[in-house]
Amino acid sequence: MNTLIITAHPSSMGFTHSIAHAYKENAEIEGRDVEILDLYATDLKQDFLRFEKMSDIGKNEITQKMQQKIEWAEELVFVFPVWWADAPAILKNWIDCNFTTGFAFKYINGKPVGLLKNKTARIFATSGAPSFVYGLFPLPYKILWGMLRLGFCGITTTYLKVFGNMEKTSAVDKKSALSKEMKKIFG
């Protein structure tokens, strides 16, 4: 299985990077091919989405390279901090730029059809707020990410974890929580 891990945290010392590397190590033990795509460190930088005509979206070289990575992956793993109740703008922009019409979805008779049907996704988020808060929003993360963003493109979300209270959690407790999550996933 090919796994693409997409991280979106500006600090290389952030817990999101610990999650990404732990996931990569465990997945490689299972024999998977894994790539971590750090949106803050990649050479494939994408400006905020701009266009004059919808038909121009996705035509540039960087978007095509990113879409090749997405095509390669059977599993997408998103790892990000929660800022202002959602993922950082750099990750939302990555989705805007790369999950384009004709690549990730299309409309048939006015209805959307996901084109990335043979892919799964896992989502790991970190937050200063308690984890349970993200089930209380009018649009819980399972719906926002699992159905409206990824599900719209045909991707099945198989796992969603919000690590809460990160500012109050010690490094030892973070490591323990991460180990527990990896055991849930990889056994």
Image (cartoon, rainbow, N blue to C red):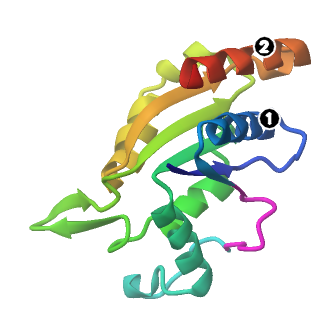
Mark 2 vs mark 1, CA separation in Å: 12 Å
**Along the line of sight, which residue is nearer the eye, 180 or 34?**
34
Query: Horizontal placement of 132 versus 149: left or right?
Result: right
Q: Residue 82 at x, y = what percent?
A: 67, 36
Q: Earlier in the sequence, mark 2 or mark 1?
A: 1
**Along the line of sight, which residue is nearer the eye, 121 or 187?**
187
**Along the line of sight, which residue is nearer the eye, 42 or 27?**
27
Predominant SS along the magenta part: loop
Q: Residue at label 1?
A: 18
Amino acid type assigned to the residue bearing label 1 in the image: Ser
Query: Horizontal placement of 5 versus 12: left or right?
Result: left
Bounds of the magenta segment: 36-46
**Along the line of sight, which residue is nearer the eye, 10 or 15?**
15
Q: Name the residue: 71% across, 49% down.
A: 8
Amino acid type assigned to the residue bearing label 2 in the image: Ser
Q: Relative to residue 39, is residue 26 depicted above or below?
A: above
Name the secondary structure under disc 2.
Answer: helix
Q: Residue at label 2?
A: 176
